[in-house]
Amino acid sequence: MPWPDEPVDIFPAWAPDGHGFAFASNRGDGPIWWKDIDPARPIRPLTSNDRAFVDMSPTVGPGVTVYFIGRRAEHDREIYRTKAGEVPVQLTELAAEVGTPALSPTGDRLIAAVGSFDDAVAPLDTQLVIFNLNGDRLRTVKSPRLEMRMEIATDPDWVPALASVPRPSPIPALASPVPSPSPSPSGSPHPSPSP
């Protein structure tokens, strides 16, 4: 099916400070692009390749460092890192498919699903792997073999530590109600004025 004439933009990912975002596109100059929130700044490509969507699924770290999934030559998809004006650096050599990387809230680790996502090529089989920012595998956090055929791990994300989540302020105690006046012996709530 031919590509539409208008650009197709997918996989948007915010910068941590919210001043812009990266996304994948079939625009002419590159698959991964950057857009500042400032409308006066033009959209600019971060990567270039000879086929649309060879690079995809960006995630953005501090300093507009962008981690993404890329495919070069005959290799499987791998995790790459780049910044504006820099040549992308390949971080992993997994010899397997890899899903969208997610940057930890502390900005020092990545997590991604690694394995087989296409049962036409190999049995569905994935695991969640934590990497440092150089692409070294630190830890596998999920068994790769699940009993249900379609129950595979894909696109994980981080949750901030509970200790860092702001807790709601305690609700102040309500003031004690003003007691009602005691009725007088005559049954009236207030004593009658003296003549």
Image (cartoon, helix red, strand yellow):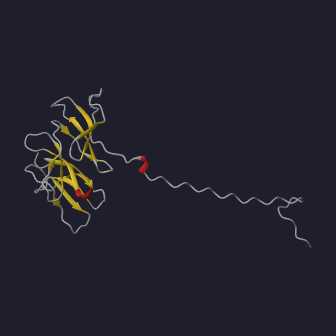
**Residue 188 image position (x, y, % from top left):** 85, 61
Disc tally is 0
Q: Residue at x 20, y 48 (%)?
A: 68
Give left or right: position of 145 versus 192. Answer: left
| On-image quarter of the C terminus | bottom right
Q: Which one is in front, 170 or 193?
A: 170
Residue 35, compared with residue 116, is above or below; it is below
Kindly give the residue lying farthest to the top in the view shown. 147
**Residue 185 image position (x, y, % from top left):** 89, 58
Q: Which one is in front, 33 or 138?
A: 138
Q: Which one is in front, 109 or 40?
A: 109
Q: Residue at x 25, y 66 (%)?
A: 38
**Residue 177 image position (x, y, % from top left):** 70, 58
Give left or right: position of 16 versus 32. Answer: right
| On-image quarter of the N terminus | top left
Give left or right: position of 84 versus 189. Answer: left
Kindly give the residue lying farthest to the bottom in the view shown. 195
Kindly give the residue lying farthest to the right in the view shown. 195
Residue 7, compared with residue 126, is above or below; it is below
**Residue 182 image position (x, y, % from top left):** 82, 58
Residue 153, compared with residue 189, is above or below; it is above
